[in-house]
Amino acid sequence: MSDLRELYQQLIIDHARHPRNFGRVPEANHTQEGFNPLCGDRLQVYLSETEELITVARFEGSGCAISMASASLMTEAIRGKTVVEINELFCVFHELMMGHHRPSDEKKLGKLVALAGVAAFPVRVKCATLCWHTTQAALKDSQQTVSTESC
Ligand code: ZN
């Protein structure tokens, strides 16, 4: 295993064991439950926006290490972004999960690139994308235009 892969694996384990932004937000503007029956991952996403920026992004739930780490990394990645930016980021992340990402995407992905190895395991891709699909559904009631860019 290369040093980089080992570093990525450590990052995933750290986020799975100590998820960031974990916990309920009763006053959130948007909340949505997500479920991945293939693995049993279940999570609830809480989002609040202020002046078109997502200022609160938290989640709670339980599931495999990949689903928890992905949700933890996602909440860090989307906070401070607009809904349009989040949809664009999901498209890039989705490409990563399909094993199609380009080196130029890595800057946009930031720490999310640690999940690149998941692409080799199609069943686990659903674990990693659950939080993103849940977030998109939570934002559907948003006043903002959702990106028409299909994933
Ligand atoms: Zn899972």
Image: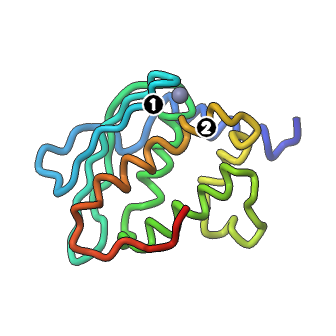
Give residue 97's position: percent from left, percent from top: 66, 49
3 left or right of 18 in image: right
Q: Residue 36, which numbered label?
A: 1
Q: In which quarter of the image is residue 143?
A: bottom left
| Circle 2 Cα neighbour tier, 10 Å, few/some/many (<14 / 14–19 / ≥20) | many
Residue in the picture at 41% in, 52% down: 75
> Which quadrant, please, contains the N terminus?
top right
Q: Looking at the picture, does residue 63 appear above or below residue 48?
A: above
Viewer-nearest residue: 111 or 148: 148
Q: Alpha-carbon neighbours of circle 1 within 10 Å: few (<14), some, or many (≥20)? A: some
Alpha-carbon span between mark 2 and mark 1: 19 Å
State the residue at coordinates (59%, 57%): 93
Q: Which of 100 and 64 is in front in this view?
A: 100
Q: Can you tell me whether the CB of the residue at mark 1 lies under 8 Å from the nearest atom of ligand 1? A: yes
Q: Do the residues labelled 2 and 1 touch (CB within 8 Å)?
A: no
Q: Is the CB atom of the residue marked by disc 2 within 8 angstroms of ligand 1's nearest atom? A: no
Residue type, label 2 = Ile
Tell me, for residue 12, which label it has, or none.
2
Residue 6 rendering spot, x and y as whole percentages: 77, 37
Amino acid type of the residue tagged 1 in the rendering: Asn
Number of numbered labels in the structure image? 2
From the viewer's side, name the closer residue of 20 and 150: 150
Q: In this view, does 104 lie above or below 131?
A: below
Between marks 2 and 1 in the image, the one whose residue lies nearer the viewer: 1
Q: Residue 101 carries which label?
A: none
Which residue is depicted at the point 33% across and 53% down?
137
Q: Which of marks 2 and 1 is nearer the N terminus?
A: 2
Q: Residue at coordinates 51% horizontally, 34% vertically from top-left?
A: 67
Quadrant containing the C terminus is bottom right
| Horizontal side, residue 99 vs residue 30: left or right | right
Image-based side of 117 in relation to 44, left or right: right
